Structures are given as C-alpha cells and as structure tokens.
Image: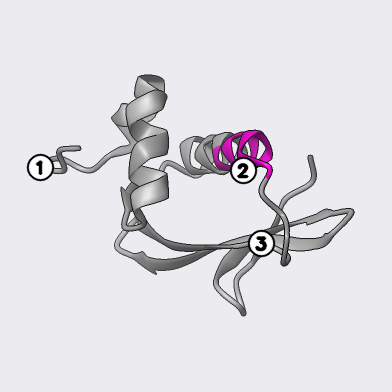
Amino acid sequence: MEIKDNTFARQFETIVTEGLVSVEYSFQEKKIFLTKINTPEGFDNEEFISIFLENIMEIAIERKFKIVPILPKIVLFFKKNPIYKELLPPGIRL
C-alpha cells in the first residue's frame, strides 16, 4: 500500500479502485491528532481501513511521533491493536 503524507491538506492518503481514502490530522509538538477518515461513497471495507491505519502507525513509529486518536473508529482500532498503545502520549487512556 502506498501512502502519501499530504502536508498541505493535512492528511494521509491512498488510492483505491473507488477513489481516494484519507485520514485527516492536525500536528502539534511531535503529536499527530487523527481527526477524520474520508472514504469514497459506498466504500465500506473495514479491513482495508484497519490496514491503512496500521501503515499510518508505522509512519508514526519511524518519525517518532505520538498519536492522539480523536475519532471513535480510531480509538477502537487502538483497543483492537494493543501493540500500538506505545504510540499514545502519557496520560491518554482508552
């Protein structure tokens, strides 16, 4: 999966057959706040979204960023994938 970090639009992006899938973020002090998931109309592949989020977590690990999940779907991702809880800043509990 190829992921583009579109810093101008403040989102991670990837292309699927149906169109563009993106995760919007805001960035503050080495923390990425994941705020929204955008998918093409009719796209409901939850497994793909999970793999996309895993790839975003790997980018955060490489760049030594912490992740602050704002969207409930992303909070649920962290609950299902406890290996990424190390990416949460101190004091964030899910």
Q: Which tag, 1 or 2, sits closer to the chain's start?
A: 2
Would you say the residues marked 2 and 3 are in contact, meaning their CB atoms lie under 8 Å apart?
Answer: yes
Query: For mark 3, what is the residue?
Result: 39
Q: Is residue 92 left or right of residue 54?
A: left
Residue 26 position by quadrant: bottom left
Residue type (three-letter) at the residue carrying disc 1: Gly
Where residue 91 is drawn, which disc sits there?
1
Residue type (three-letter) at the residue carrying disc 3: Thr
Residue count near mark 2 (Cα–Cα under 10 Å), binned few <14, some 14–19, many ≥20: some
Tell me residue 20's x, y (percent): 76, 64
Q: Main secondary structure of the magenta part?
A: helix
Q: In this view, does 64 lie to the left or right of 17?
A: left
Query: For mark 2, what is the residue?
Result: 49
- Residue 65, can we see it? no
In front here: 13 or 20?
20
Q: What stretch is highlighted in magenta?
A: 45-53
Relative to 90, residue 69 above or below: below
Whole-Å distance between the Cαs marked 2 and 3?
Answer: 9 Å
The type of colouring in the image is one colour
Q: Residue at x 58, y 66 (%)?
A: 11
